[in-house]
Amino acid sequence: MGRSDKIILVEETENLRSIGKNYPRFEGVHKASGSYIYTPDISLPRMLYGKFRRSDVPHSKIVHIDTRKAKKVKGVVAVLTGADLSFSFGIYVNDEPFLARDKVRYMGEPVAAVSAISADIAAEAAEKIVIEYEELEPVFDPVDAMQKGAPLVHPDLHEYHVEPIFQAKPHTNICTFVHLEKGNIEKGFDDSYEIYEDKFQSQPTAHCPLETHVTIAQVDLSGKITIWTNTQAPFLVRRELAKAFGLPLNKIRVIVRGLGGGFGGKSYTRIEPITVALAQHSNNRLVKIELTRQEEFEITVHKEPAKVYMKTGVTSDGIILARQVRAIYDAGAYAEGSPLVVRNACFTAAGPYNIEHVLIEGYCVYTNNPISGPLRGFGTPQLTWAYESQMDIIAHKLGIDPLEIRLKNCLEEGHEMPSGEILKSVGLRQTLEKAAEEIGWNDFLPKQDHGIGIACCHKLSFSPATSSAIVRIDEDGTVQVDCATVEMGQGSNNTLIQIASESLGVPFERIGISSPDTDYSPYDQSTTASRSTFTMGNAIILACEELKQQLLNIASRYYGVTSDKLEIFDGRIRPKDSDKSGLTYEDLIHQHFRPRKASLVGKGIYTSNAVLADVKTGKTPRASAFWMYGTQIVLLKVDNDTGQVEVEKVVSVYDVGKVINPQGVEGQIEGGVIQGLGDVLLEDLIIDEGKILNPSFRDYHIVTMMDAPEIVPICVEASHDEGPFGAKGVGELVLNATAPAVANALSNAVGVRLHDLPLSQEKIFHKTRKNSNSTGATHDTKN
Amino acid sequence: MHKITLKVNGEMYSVLVEAGKTLVDLLRDDLQLTGSKKGCDMGDCGVCIVLVDGLPVNSCLVLAAEMEGKEITTIEGLAQNGILHPLQQAFIDHGAIQCGFCTPGMILTAKEILDQNPNATKEDIRSALAGNLCRCGGYNKIIKATLSLINKH
Amino acid sequence: MIRRIEYYRPDSLSEALALLEKYGEDLKVLAGGTNLLVQLKEKTIHPKVIMDIKNIPGLSSLKINDKGEGCIGPLATMRAIEHWCSSYGRYNSLRSAAQQLGSPVIGNRATVGGNLCDGSPAADTAIVLLSYDTKLVLNELGKERTVALGDFFLCPHRVDLNPYEILSQITIPQLPVSTGEAFYKLGRRKALHIALVGVAVSITRDVVSPQKIKNVRIALSSVAPTPMRAKKAEGVLAGQEWNEDLLEEAGRLAADAASPITDIRATKEYRRAMIPVLVRRALNEAWNNTEKKSGETKE
C-alpha cells in the first residue's frame, strides 16, 4: 500500500546531476495560483467572437443557404458559408473544407460561421441562418462503407492530394490501406497445432481535455496572420494554413500557451482555418472561437472505433507461429490524422511477440460519422485490446498460465518485426517479470468474485521526425531554452530543462523554457507520439554541446591551452588536472564580450533515426527510432448481481528507457491507467445514425476521483543508446494494457469473455446471466 | 441590468450585471479573474469552482445576480502577501498538478474540506472532490497532496 | 449567457406569490439552480422571468416540530440536509440520498425542493421521501393546500404544482420505533451520476413480535415515468414474518410494477432486472438497521 503513488525505478540513478530527480513543476506556481494563462483566458482589443451553424443531417446536399436574417442581427460583423471559402485542409488527405461546401458529410459539421461583438449574438445570428438540404444516402458502418456500391463520402477522393506515404483507393471510401507481411502466413497456419479466430471491437472514445479547443485569429493589413491556439502542433498548423491560404510560412505566426490537456485531440488542424477566415472577413478585427463542451464532442475528433479480426496459429506449448490481423478503422467523414494512425498502428498489430509468419491488413475508411482521429496510443489501443484479449483466450484453451505464454513469445532485442526491423532496447520481458513480482503472480489466489488479469503492449513513435532547439546562456550564467514542444500537462518543461541542466551542468532553477511561437521558436514536428523527450531532448543536447564548444573556445583563449586540455565540470571550465575552481560560464561570457554584455547561443537540430516504410510493402529496416513496452496487472471485484466492476489495484510497469523526470513519468503512468479504466469500463461515445447521443460530461462518463483505484507505477529502464541519457518516451502507451488486463481479470473472476468495448456493467450482467443460464459458468469461455 | 455588490478576494465590487450572466462569466470576463476555468458550463466538471461564503460552488451554475452581498474566493485570492497557500504548495510538491486546468477548482474544494474538518480522512477527501474531474488522471496525487496537510496538524 | 430573461428576487413569500400571480407560466422559480441553469442553457425551457426565492426568510429551515415531524424547507440544500440528518441521527436514507446527489459541490447548491419540483423520474430525494409518508405544502396567492408526495408526480418533469403555486414546506413523519431505512442508487460510476435504478425502503418491525414486518414502504426511481411506490411488493411484506423468500417475491412484484425505458444510460431489460436485486439489498439493509435501532432503544 505504502508504495502506491511512488515510482519504483528498476535501476539506480547513476551519478547524474538532474536526470532522474524530481523538481517542482516549472510552471507549477502559475498553475497553482491561477495566473497561468491558457488560450481561452486571452482576450485582446477589438476582438470579436465566432460561432458556427452546424448541420443536423449526416449526409446531404446543401441546396441553399439563406444568411440574410443572420446578417441583420445587430452586432454581427461577418457571416460566412462554404461558398465563400474555396480552400480545403487536411495534412494527409486534403479533404476537409473550412465550412461544408456543396454537401455535408457528418451531423454537426460546421456549415456557416458568424462573427459578432459577443458570443451570444453570434450564436443567435447563426440560428437564424436557413439551410435547405437534399438528403443523400449515408453510410455509417465502415464494413458497409468498404462494399462495392456503398455511398461515397468523398466521390472526389482521386482528385485530393494524398501524402505519398499513404495508399488511398480512389472511387471507394478507403482513404488508406496497409499491407504488411512476414514469412508465409499459410504455411504458418498449416504448421499450427491449433488456430484461434476472434473478432474484437473498440468503441469511439473522446479525448475530453478539460480545456476545449480555442483559437484567436488576427489578420493585419500587411496580410500577416497571427493566431493564438491550443494546438499540440504549432508548426503543422502553420504549414496547413500557409498551404490553404497560399501564403509563405513567414506570413503566419502561431502562438501556443500551455494546454489544458491534449491527449492527441489537438494534434492536427481543427478550428484554426475557419477562425482565420472569419477574421479575414471581419474588418481587420480579431476573432475568437471557443468551443462549447458539446461542440468539443461533436466537431473535434474522437478515437477511431475499430473492428479487429485476429487469427492466430500456435504450437501445442503455446508458441505463436502465425498471426493474421485485419483491422478496420472508421475515420468518420474526414481523414484528419487517421491515415497515419492506421499506418503506424499496423506496425504493432501482431502484438509484442516474436512471430514467424504474419499478415497485417489495415483499412482506414470514410463514413458519415463525426470525424475520428488520434487519441493517446494512436490506433494501438484498439489492437492491444484484440491481441491481449486473444492471448488469454489462447492461454486458457491450452491450459497455459497467462504470464507464461507471454514470456514464451515476448519480443527481445534482435527479434525481427513484421516490417523487417531488427529491434534494440526491448524491456518487455522485464516489465512482465516486474509486474508479476510486484503482485506476487505465481502465488496469487483471487478471493470469491475477484479476478486478476495481465496484459502487455508495445508502441512505436512517429519517426523519422525533426526537432530543433536554441539554448542561450545569458550574461549572468542563466540559461533559456527555446523550443516548440507544447507543455500540456505531461511535464515536458521539467524534462527538457533537466536535460539542459544535465548537459550544461547548470542547476535546474537557473534554466527557463519558453512556450511555442513560430516567429521565434525553432522548428518542431509536433508534441505527439511520446516523441518529445527523445527527439527534442536530443536537439537540446546538441544545442548544449554547441554552447559548450563555444565556452571551451573562450576558455582556451583565456588559459592559453587548446580546448582538449580543458574540462567542464559543474558549470565551470578549468584546465584538466588543475585544482583551481575554474571559470564559471558567467565569467567566460564576461571575458568574451567585455566591456559589453551579451549572450551565447547554441542550436541543435535532431532528426530521429528511422527509415520511412515502403508504401506498398510496409517494409523498413527501422520503423521507429525507439519502441516502448509495458505490462499491467489488474485486480478487480465483480458484483455478480449487477455486473458492476470495482478495480481495486493496478500495477503498471513500463519500459520508458532512462527515467528523466520521475514525478512526470508517475503522472503519465497513473493518468494512463485512469484513462484506460474509463476506456474499458465507462467511456462510450454513442453514435446512432451519425448522431452523437451523449455529447456532455453528464452523459459521457469519464473516471472520477471516486472510481480511482490504487495504482503502482513502476519503470523498467531499458536504456536506448540514441536516447537522451538513455531515455525513450512514455505518454502514449500507458493506457493500452488497461482494457485487456481488465477483461482478462473479469474472465478470471466470473468466466465471461467480452469482445466489444466498453465492458459496461450491463453487458457484463447480461453475459454472466447468459453463461449461468446455459451450461453453468465455466471460466474464460469464448464469446 | 442588476446592480450587485459583492466581495471578491477581499475586495468590494459594485457591478451591473445582465440577469442571465453566470458567476463564472462575471469573474472571467468582467473582473478578469481567469483563474476560474470553464470546462463544460453545465456543472459537470468542477473547473469553475469558487468559494461562495466559504462553500465550493460551480460558478457556471450560479447567476451573478444571485451573488448580492456574497463573499467570493477565487484561486487568485488564496495566496497571501505573495506566499502561496499551503495547499497550493502541497499540490506543487506532490506533483498533483499536470495540465493544471482542474487545479483551481481542486484546490478550492480541498481548502474547504481542510477548513471544515482538520481531521478529514482519505475517504472524506475523495468524496468531497468527487465533483472535480481531472482528465490527466492525477487523482491519487491530489489526494496525497491534500492529505499531507492533514497529517501535519 | 442566458439571453432575454428577467431576474427577480422577492424578499417575502407574499411578494413571490404576487409575482407568480403576475407571470404564471412565464416564470420559473430559481432555487439552487443546479437543474434550472442547465435547462436554461440547453434551452429546454424558455421562461421570461426567473424568480430567485433564496431571499425569502424561512424557506431553508430544517426543524422537528412539536409532533416530532420533520419540517424541511424546500430551499434546504443537500449539504444542509446531510448535516441535519447526521446531527439528529434520523432519516438515514435521506442523508445518504443527499450525499449521493451529483457530488458534494452540487450538494452545496442543490435543494430538496428543486429536486422534487423538477419532477425527474430519477430524483434521488424523491424516492426517499416517498419511502416516508411525506406531505407537501403548496401556496398560491390567498390559498394553501397540502398534497401527499405520492400524488405529486404526474409524468416526467411534470408535478402537481400549478403555474401560480410554490412549494413552501415538506413534512416528513417521525419514523416509528424499530424502523430501518435504506437507499440504494445504481450508477455507472461512483459519483456525478444519475440513478440507473434507485430504491429507497423504510421498514418497521412489529414491536410485539420482532420477526414480523409491521409496515414497509418501497420506492423506486428511474424505472417509471415518475418516482414510484412499489405497493404490491409492500403488500406481500406487511404483516408477514421476515424471510428471504418474501424478498424474492417483493422484488419480483416491484419489477412487475415498473415500466422502465431504454435510454443512453441503460436498457429497460437491465433496469427491470436490477429492481429485485436492489429491492432485496435495500430491504435486507433496512431490516438490519431496525435491529440496530431497536437494540439501541432497549438500552
Image: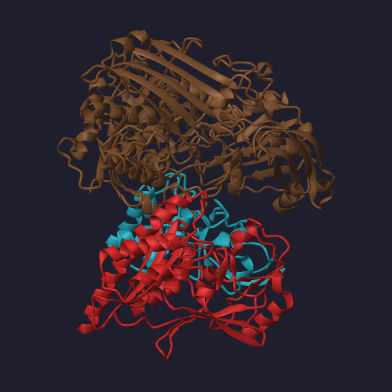
Taking B23 as reference, is A413 above or below it?
Answer: above
Taking B94 as reference, is A476 above or below it?
Answer: above
Q: Is residue C53 left or right of residue A121?
A: left
Quadrant hosting residue A560: top left
- Chain A colour? brown
- Chain B colour? cyan
Q: Residue at x 31, y 10 (%)?
A: A190
User: In the picture, which chain is red?
Assistant: C
Quarter of the image where the C terminus of chain A is located: top left
Q: Is residue A437 left or right of residue B42?
A: left
Quadrant hosting residue A97: top right
Query: As rendered, which of A535 and C19 lies closer to the eye?
Result: C19
Residue C281 seen by the camera = no
Of all residues shown, which one is farthest toward the left?
A: A443
Taking A673 as reference, is A72 above or below it?
Answer: below
Residue A263 seen by the camera = yes
Q: Is residue A612 left or right of residue A188?
A: right
Query: As rendered, which of A381 and A749 lies closer to the eye?
Result: A749
Quadrant hosting residue C211: bottom left
Q: Is residue A337 left or right of residue A216?
A: left
Colouring method of the image: by chain
Query: As rendered, which of A280 and A581 lies closer to the eye?
Result: A280
Give the percent coordinates (x, y) of residue A201.
44, 32
Q: Residue at x 80, y 47 (%)?
A: A70
